[in-house]
Amino acid sequence: MLSLSCAALQPLIRNLDRYVALTPDDRAAIAALGDRSQVEKPAHTDIAREGERARVAHAVISGWACCYKDLPDGRRQILGFLLPGDVFDLNLDSLREQDCSVSALTRVRLAELLPSQVRALPDDHPRVWKALLLQQQANAAILREWLLNTGQRTAIERLAHLLIELFLRNRAIGLASREGLKFPITQSHLAEATGLTPVHVNRTVQALRRQDLIEYANGHLKILDLARLSDIALFDAKYLCVEEYQ
Amino acid sequence: MLSLSCAALQPLIRNLDRYVALTPDDRAAIAALGDRSQVEKPAHTDIAREGERARVAHAVISGWACCYKDLPDGRRQILGFLLPGDVFDLNLDSLREQDCSVSALTRVRLAELLPSQVRALPDDHPRVWKALLLQQQANAAILREWLLNTGQRTAIERLAHLLIELFLRNRAIGLASREGLKFPITQSHLAEATGLTPVHVNRTVQALRRQDLIEYANGHLKILDLARLSDIALFDAKYLCVEEYQ
DNA sequence: GGATGATCCTAACATAGGTGATATTGGCGC
DNA sequence: GCGCCAATATCACCTATGTTAGGATCATCC
């Protein structure tokens, strides 16, 4: 039974282990943390809304989600993608309102981390707590890279950069191989994430395909030439906490 | 002597007090923290470089700085402005390399926070530590708003939004009044922060001036009509930890 | 007080990317 | 196997913003 839940929580443990070397005891603590209460959300539903106060923190167990902000007139910016092992709504100040919304892109399984559990963490499992804080910092680093991306890179550079990031992040948690990865992201999502229009994302995707850099169809993405794609994207993996690059 | 240093550290204390109600003891702790070692950097010099490891954390005592990333071909994106009271390089993991550079925009006075001091903080002054973590979270919220800004807003919206943010942040630390604020930011800086070109920033600044929304000259900025400017910018102050909006 | 350099301003022109509208495809429920 | 809907693909045209280039202004320093 415990081993069963451990299997589901493997991405979370694997993700946090990237930031701090975890002991077996730490892993057990994470398993206990994530096992208490899990929920499922269907695809295309909101998990959290901007302006609400988060009751609990969440860790993604399986599936894809994204956080986003929108403007009153409907324009929307995706701020980041959440993959298995990613923690969000980790609010140190329960009074503070969420400043962005979170939406499920696929059916998503989430672990709910109660405030009482989270508050006990610094004392009871300092390494786990540190790993969580470092994951937050790593997310901020990704955000900075995204700002550089939308602010300075051209359409093809942006798109290439985003695809590489998602490939590497999936690979780091064991969800991508040579053969590619499950990629439940539409071109409209890519548009909202890059600040482009869907039409122009389509043009750009085709340019990448024509150059034999990617395959992208039917919810599946394959990077055909990572080196060349990285050149185009001006990609530098340092901002991701992913050691082995190639 | 202590009172003298307290005067200089007032912005830091005032800034952190926004996140957690500080006791006199906490304030004394912050003063002691910031008083041990201070350095001055001349304008237009780098304080930290991407790829380096930070020896110490820094708090801005006076002056303006910015953090930025650049691409190999020289394109540069400003990721945020650092004002008095802002803490940066707060690295929980001393091994990790900085993922962005920091540059002084004016002559800047900095307090150096030694790792040993920072490490002692969670135990010795938990409220101060919490305030620091919340400031980091607030910075991440600003970053998300900037991504929305560059990704979705038009040039005039972007610029208006940035100017309002800088006005409100300065006012929150007592550096702006009805009469405006010291604004040591060139149009080229605004361009690098918004992902526009200096030429187009200039066009847009003039549009704002023509509509009697701002005065901006000689290192001084004045917001003439905050309400109207906020409408244009689609500005929502919630993302800033600044209570009294008007 | 003339030289220097940074900043700001302007204008003519170029283009990356946006808009709107209309196919086409493909997965999926019945 | 048919109908439906979302997602993808094209196309023609448009515009916000970029580019290049030059001139005006202003502070600083010898």
Image: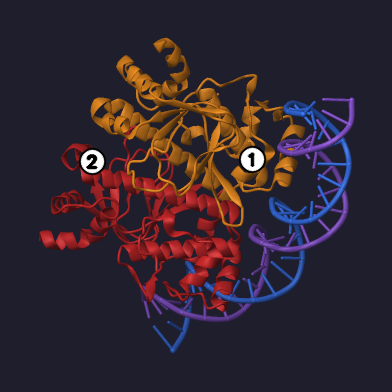
Chain colours: A red, B orange, C purple, D blue
Q: Is residue D9 above or below residue A61?
A: below
The quarter of the image holding the C terminus of chain B is top right
Query: What's the residue type where badge 2 is placed?
Result: Val
Visible residue check, residue A72: no
Residue identifier under label 1? B190
- Mark 2 burial class by Cα count in 10 Å: few <14, some 14-19, many 20+: some
Would you say B208 lies left or right of A124 here?
right
Visible residue check, residue A165: yes
Would you say B200 lies left or right of A185 here?
right
Mark 1 or 2: in front is: 1
Q: CA distance from mark 1 to mark 2?
A: 40 Å
Instruction: Name the element at disc 1.
Output: helix
Residue A175 on image: x %, y %:
32, 67
Do callouts 1 and 2 mark residues in contact (Cβ within 8 Å)? no
- Mark 1 burial class by Cα count in 10 Å: few <14, some 14-19, many 20+: many
Which residue is located at x 60 percent, y 36 percent? B44
Instruction: Name the element at disc 2.
Output: helix
Residue A155 on image: x %, y %:
59, 62
The quarter of the image holding the N terminus of chain B is top left
Q: Residue A231 has which mark? A: none
Image mark 1: chain = B
- In front of the other: A89 or A126: A126
Residue D23 on image: x %, y %:
89, 42
Would you say B241 lies left or right of A123 here?
right
Which residue is located at x 38 percent, y 19 percent? B31
Residue identifier under label 2? A118
Give the total number of marks visible in the rendering.
2
Query: What's the residue type where badge 1 is placed?
Result: Leu
